[in-house]
Image: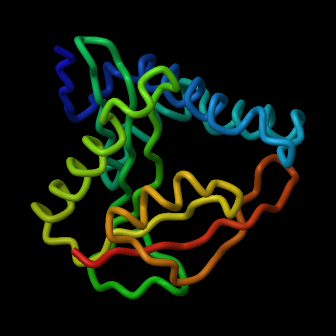
């Protein structure tokens, strides 16, 4: 039987998280016709370098969780405390900045396990709202978030390289 465990990431996980972040983002978005390869590559080189991930791990407002399936890193999530954007209504917000799993583990409960752990962590910290941005052309993720109690409250621009894309802002009361 497959055993999923979720744990907080530490500085020592920088390499594992860099590999997870790079691979899962590539798998999720590289083959979408609306993403130009140059823009995707530019964004990924900046966002998912080991130096960048290490910097994020050292940020006291960032919390990374790693999901492991039978001891293998299968997915991760990143929360950012006290981050908010126009359209989000919260006094003690937490942003679900990233939630990704390896393609081979889709449908095995990694995403839901990470979501549950993020919500639990946010409630332990007395957060009142969790929010996120999800690409307008990612209906699978939108359905997942709706199933988990999120609702659309607005939109913002996400810059992928030089391509301004629209992310739907979704929030969920905790």
- Residue 3 sits in which quadrant? top left
Vertical relation: 139 (above or below) 48? below
- Residue 158 sits in which quadrant? bottom right
Q: Residue at x 24, y 11 (%)?
A: 71
- Looking at the picture, how far across and down is residue 4, in whole percent? 21, 25
The furthest residue to the left? 124
Q: Residue at x 38, y 57 (%)?
A: 80
Q: Is residue 147 left or right of residue 121?
A: right
> Quarter of the image containing the C terminus?
bottom left
Q: Is residue 142 left or right of residue 144?
A: right
Q: From the viewer's side, name the closer residue of 17 and 165.
A: 165
Q: Is residue 174 left or right of residue 18?
A: left
Q: Residue at x 80, y 36 (%)?
A: 42
Q: From the viewer's side, name the closer residue of 138 and 75.
A: 138
Q: From the viewer's side, name the closer residue of 53 and 24.
A: 24
Vertical relation: 10 (above or below) 15? below
Marker count (numbered): 0
- Looking at the picture, how far across and down is residue 18, in whole percent? 51, 24
Q: Residue at x 59, y 82 (%)?
A: 154
- Looking at the picture, how far across and down is residue 87, in whole percent? 52, 86
């Amino acid at each position: 039987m497959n055993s999923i465990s979720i744990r907080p990431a530490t500085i020592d996980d920088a390499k594992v998280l860099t590999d997870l972040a790079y691979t899962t983002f590539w798998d999720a978005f590289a083959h979408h016709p609306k993403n130009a390869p140059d823009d995707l590559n530019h964004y990924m080189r900046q966002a998912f370098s080991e130096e960048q991930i290490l910097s994020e791990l050292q940020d006291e407002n960032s919390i990374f969780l790693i999901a492991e399936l039978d001891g293998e890193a299968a997915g991760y999530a990143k929360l950012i405390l006290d981050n908010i954007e126009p359209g989000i209504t919260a006094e003690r917000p937490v942003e679900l900045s990233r939630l990704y799993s390896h393609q081979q583990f889709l449908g095995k409960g990694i995403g839901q396990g990470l979501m549950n752990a993020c919500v639990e962590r946010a409630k332990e910290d007395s957060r009142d709202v969790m929010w996120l941005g999800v690409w307008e052309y990612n209906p699978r993720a939108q359905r997942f978030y709706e199933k988990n109690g999120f609702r659309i409250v607005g939109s913002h621009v996400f810059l992928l390289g030089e391509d301004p894309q629209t992310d739907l802002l979704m929030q969920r009361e905790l």
